[in-house]
Each structure stands twice: as structure tokens, then as C-alpha cells.
Amino acid sequence: MTEEGKHALVFGASGLVGWGVVDQLLSNYPSQGTFGKVTALVNRPFDIQDSLWPKQPSAIPKVQLVSGVNLTQANVENLTKLLKASVRDIEKVTQVFYFVYKSEDNPEKEVRVNCKMLECAVGALNELCPKLEFLVFPSGTKAYGIHIPGGVFTPPYEESMGPLPDKHQKSINYPALRNVLERASAGKHWAWCDIRPDAVIGFVPNGSAFNLTAHWATYLSLYALVQGKGAKVPFPGTLKAYNSLYNEASAEMIAKCSIWAALHPDQTGNGQIFNIADQSNPESMRDRWPALAAYFGLEGTAPADDGEGMLKPSEYIKKHYGVLEEHGVKSSPVFRGEFLDSYGYYLDFDRHLSLEKVRKAGFTEAKDPNESWFKAFDRFKQAGMIAAPFHAHQNIVQNQKNALTPRYLISGVHSSHPHNSSYTLLPSMSKNQPQKAVIFHFPFLPSDLSRHAISLFPKKNFRKAAKWQNSPSPFPHVPSISLRSRLFLTLPPKR
């Protein structure tokens, strides 16, 4: 490591795993000072202020965000010019994390497009980065044939399994992409490896394709709003899929493994493949679905009628999308939601991974997958991208200074911040008369309350609209809430 730390370059930093890599690098994984600089490359416009990446009180590592890196339109020459002009200290890059993928309906076209993008990237790197040490590239369990009905190999899947039968091998990217890296690294001083997860759990603030976490977060939060807390929500799939074994990987775990691999070329280089998951122990949706549903106050159950006749998640979201709009949700775009609906139907066989190889190589981190899901849900909630149901109850709230002044107390508990935040509504009334108050319970989003004025529009209760105001003593006040749109409520009539 140089005195100023290593320089990481992350392609696809706004994608599901790329975002996670930047998140871990800015969290100083594996230790403070390992990386002195992180450059995040993205295609779509992306504001670092909305990224939810960690703040950097010590400003180490330094971060640079470069937008407009569209590999689908690039060649080696123009990409080299772009990176040279846009990336500060490009010549000092030591580790590269390549998490870029372009989906195409035609498998052969998909292979061509993704190979061209990777060829452009490594061609530019070879021109610009004389200090490059390592490149991490991700594949996936299609290499084990999970897209083929019933699967191909007997689990647990090991890295030595393969290749697939010829008719299937040509339909996946990984062999061709590995060939690109073998050619580009030949005779160079840098090495590379292939990190291989199955289903990925994670958060991104601006949407991503094939994000099952965002898809189900939107579905379950909306289901709780429409059906009410405590409602039963069947698993969207078949009973065989509900019981099949697998082990998913969080974007956080993939990121940590990628960073570890990039820092240990002697153990991981030469194009080696490493399976990765949150834990070695396989589980099923019978284990997972009830926990995910419970996060939203629902009861997750086995599939009803083997998944026949129920609205699939994307269909349910489309039908009730107006409810999300009413609650001011900044929806989480999932670009292939209809494809994700099939997750619980076609993946109806055991497909768990062996982690023996990566463990022997030295990467031993593990975590409870439920916690990975919950952490992602918390982040979607923090970003205002999923809804949280609230319930209204009537109660008498009496001001200790003036028993004739009614107040509307707002109480909430954020799932990751177990405290009560209480606020009052001071209505504009014709007379100061005691009356029923309304208590609302809902999770809050952290923000600066002073910048938000949430209006209440009663029908005939008061002469004009009133404003939410901070609650005076004796109510506790924690200034950490906001709502992302106006909340239209009807209060109970005077009694």
C-alpha cells in the first residue's frame, strides 16, 4: 500500500452491487487508510448528495463521482479520453471493481454487447493505469444452469462444476467475458478474479434492474397499506419454490468479498472463481418469507393454491399504485419487475452454493440474511422509496397548562430508532373547547423538521387549515421526522 492509500475505481457504482462496493470502501473496509481515494463511475445522472453513502468526517478516502460513463456507446479510444479528462489521478488506480451489466432479450446480442463494454473498459485501463494491481468481475449462478428448468448440477454448487452443455453455454455471458479478461491481462502486472453470488439483497437509491429486494419491499409495504397490518400475505410462488434451498448474498457481503479479493492477489488471482453468500447454511423461503412479511406487520404464509390465481407482485403494485402516490412514496424503480415475479415459480429446485473455497482462501465473514433484508428495507424507508402504514386512534390529549386547549399528538417509532417522537397539531378553531384528539402512529424518516410544513386539511372541523408544530413540554420532542408529501386526513367531528 502506498503512503496515501490505494485508489479504487468502481464501474457501475449506481447499480445494486457497485453501490455496495462504494458504500463499503467509504466505510473504510477493511480498515482505515487502506484506500485513500474512491472514484465511482456511473452512466445515468446521479447526485452524490442523494446516494446515502457514508459521510466522511475525516475525508479519507476521498470520493469522486463521474457521471456519463456509457460503456454501450464507447470504444477504447473515446473511453480513454473520457476517463483521462474526468478521473483525477487515473494513473494511480490500483484496484478496479467492474460491476456493469446490460440485459438484452436476445442472448447472443447480450453476449456481444457485454463483451464490447468490458473490452472498452480494460483497453482504457491498460492505457491509463500503470499501477493497476487487480480487477474484480462478477458472474452468477446461471453458470451452474439455474435458468434451466430443474437445474443441471447437484448442489451444493462448487466452482469446479461446469461447463454447461453447449446449447446452454452459448446463451450466458460469463465464458466470453472471462476470455476478454484473460486476453487483456496477458503479460500485464494485474490479476483478476470472478465473484459468484446467487440472488442479491441490497439497496440502491435510484432503482436498478433485477432488484428483488426493491420489488418485494414495494409489494409488501403496499400490501400492508391496502390490506392492513396483521393481514396474511401468501408467498408469490409455488410450494416447491417455497421449500427449495438456496443461500442469498447481500450487496454488502459481495462488496466485502470483492475488496478482500482485490487486496489478496496471491490467493485470488489467475481468474479464479469464488462463490459468495451471506452464510454457508442453506435456507428456504419457508424460513425467509415470514420474517420479511413481519417487518411490514404482515403474516407471511405458504403459497395459496400453489400460487395459482393470485396477483403477482408487479400486478398488485400496478393495481394499487395510486395508494403509493397518496402516501407520497418516491417509488423504487425496478426495471424488470415482471421478470422478478417469476422468482417464486421457476426456481423450484435446490440451488445452494458451497463456500468452502472462499473460506479456505481466507475470507470468513458471514451474517444473518434476515438482517441483510431488514437493513435494505430500512434504507429504502429512509430514502422515502417504500411506504409505511399508519393507524389512527382516538384519545384525549390534555395540555397541562390549559385544559381547554386541544392538541393532536403525533407519535411514531422508526424501526431502526426505538424512540418516541411526539408532535402536536394546533388547530384553528372558533372556540377553545375540549374535544377528542387523534393519535397517529407511523414510522418517520430522519430529516430536518424545520424545513417541512405538513398541512392538515379538515373538512368542517375548523375554520381553516392548520400546521403540524413541534410539541411543547410535557411531550417529548425528537426533531428527526418529515413526511415527503402532504397528508390529507379527516378528523373526527366535534363532540
Image: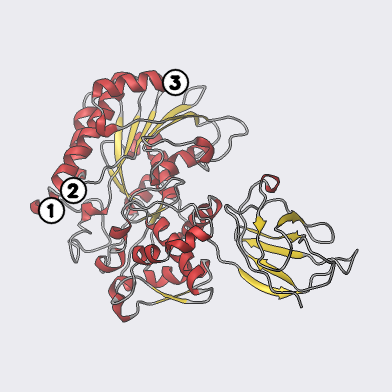
Badge 3 amino acid: Arg
How far apart are the two marked residues, 2 and 3, measured between alpha carbons? 35 Å
- Does residue 235 sit above or below 52 in this rendering? below
- Count residues near mark 2 (Cα–Cα under 10 Å), then give few for <14, some for 14-19, many for 20+: many
Residue at the outermost left position: 167
Residue 82 in sight from this viewpoint: yes
Residue with the mark numbered 3: 88
Residue 172: numbered disc = 2
Tag 2–tag 1 contact (CB < 8 Å)? yes
Give the quadrant of residue 389.
bottom right
**Which residue is rendered at x = 59% and y = 34% of the image?**
56
Badge 2 amino acid: Ile
Tag 3–tag 1 contact (CB < 8 Å)? no
Residue with the mark numbered 1: 168
The C terminus sits in image quarter: bottom right
- Does residue 120 sit above or below 179 in this rendering? above
